[in-house]
Amino acid sequence: MLKHSTKITLRAFTALLILTIIWGYNWVVMKSALQYAGPFQFAALRTFLGALVLFVVIYFTKRPLALKEFPTMLVLGILQTIGFTGLLIWALVEGGAGKTAVLTYTMPFWVMLFAWPMLGEKVQGWQWLAVVSAVFGMVLIFDPLHIKADGFSMFLAICSGVSWALSAIISKKLHQRSPNLDLLNLTAWPMLLGSVPMLAIAFIVPAPPIQWTGYFIGAVLFNVILSGALAWLLWLYALQRLPAGVASMASMLAPVIGVIAAWIQLNEVPNTFELIGMLLIALALVQISVITMRKHQPVDCAQGQE
């Protein structure tokens, strides 16, 4: 019995490792794909097709298809699809993949701050160390005394993390109100609803025609199938067999993989200040994850995950 349990746990960690590699490397894929399409064109393709694939997965896994809590689902769609995905892909136009990944993944830090007024969860004790660490990390990456050409993209990346955090808090409130909502349903419907205005933005904002190269088609498929449907199935598999806090903390490896992959493949070498800033943000994320696990309140890292 013990051996069987160990095998199940090992498979769950393997699933978690695979999806973390997919989500981490996808930052390089998205950055490279923007050579062939505008940011909003790519975001619209990724979210609309991704939503359709998720509905196919829902159908074949016999999960509930019905749309419930429409107003909240629409708000989540706008925050996750336009606010999170749209802004992060826009940030990648001028910003480095690694730096954008780290700044976007400040999400748990913003969740902790917004949970104070929105959920009544005060920042206490060791959480303040995470706050100070994250703030100093962002200041070092921004380097306000020497604003660079990618300053606006860094701002967009942080806004993306803020939007992701707001969607996580709203998701938590929705779960408290409707605890039986299926996680995949809660992902697919906001993505589909949010992709409609994203498609409109893609048509309205001027951009060169999409170059349907082999790489671009591969990047779209990577985002829709691997980073979308497959990663979500792996996430659900791991979540059912591991503590939610452990799964959420392990997913924090994604920006680390993003930084390393961008360093190797795109030659994005962080300077000393940026590297220290990234390490401080990573430290803050670890602190938040450990505190969350002790409280048994999983940070909703997967909602809108990259």
Image (cartoon, rainbow, N blue to C red):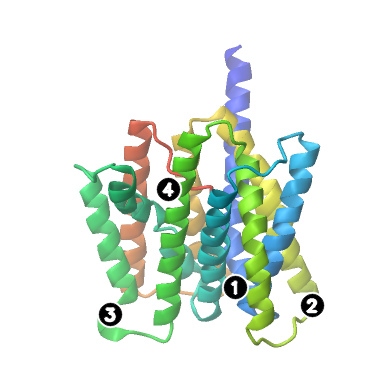
Query: Which of the two marks, 4 or 3, is nearer to us in this view?
Result: 4
Name the spot of residue 187 as percent of width and height, x first: 61, 48
Q: From what the image shows, is residue 65 above or below residue 91?
A: above
260 sits to left or right of 225? left
Structural crowding at the residue carrying mark 2, measured as other residues with C-alpha within 10 Å and reported as few (<14), some (14–19) or many (≥20): few
Label 4 with label 3: CB-CB less than 8 Å: no
Label 1 with label 2: CB-CB less than 8 Å: no
Dot 4: what SS?
helix
Residue type (three-letter) at the residue carrying disc 2: Thr
Q: Earlier in the sequence, mark 1 or mark 2?
A: 1
The CA span between labels 1 and 2 is: 15 Å
Dot 1: what SS?
helix
Name the spot of residue 38 as percent of width and height, x first: 65, 80
> Is residue 174 visible to the viewer in this orientation of the structure?
yes
Report the disc number at residue 213.
2
Q: Quadrant of the N terminus?
A: top right
> Is residue 102 visible to the viewer in this orientation of the structure?
no
Dot 3: what SS?
helix
The CA span between labels 4 and 3 is: 30 Å
Tally the marks.
Answer: 4
The CA span between labels 4 and 1 is: 28 Å
Residue type (three-letter) at the residue carrying disc 3: Pro
Q: Residue 27 sits in which quadrant?
A: bottom right
| Residue at 55% across, 79% down | 93
244 sits to left or right of 184? left
* Residue located beneath label 3 in the image: 144
| Residue at 66% across, 86% down | 207
* Residue located beneath label 4 in the image: 169
Q: From what the image shows, is residue 230 above or below residue 244?
A: below
Name the spot of residue 216 as percent of width and height, x first: 74, 73
Report the disc number at residue 31.
1
Q: Which is nearer the eye, 26 or 207?
A: 207
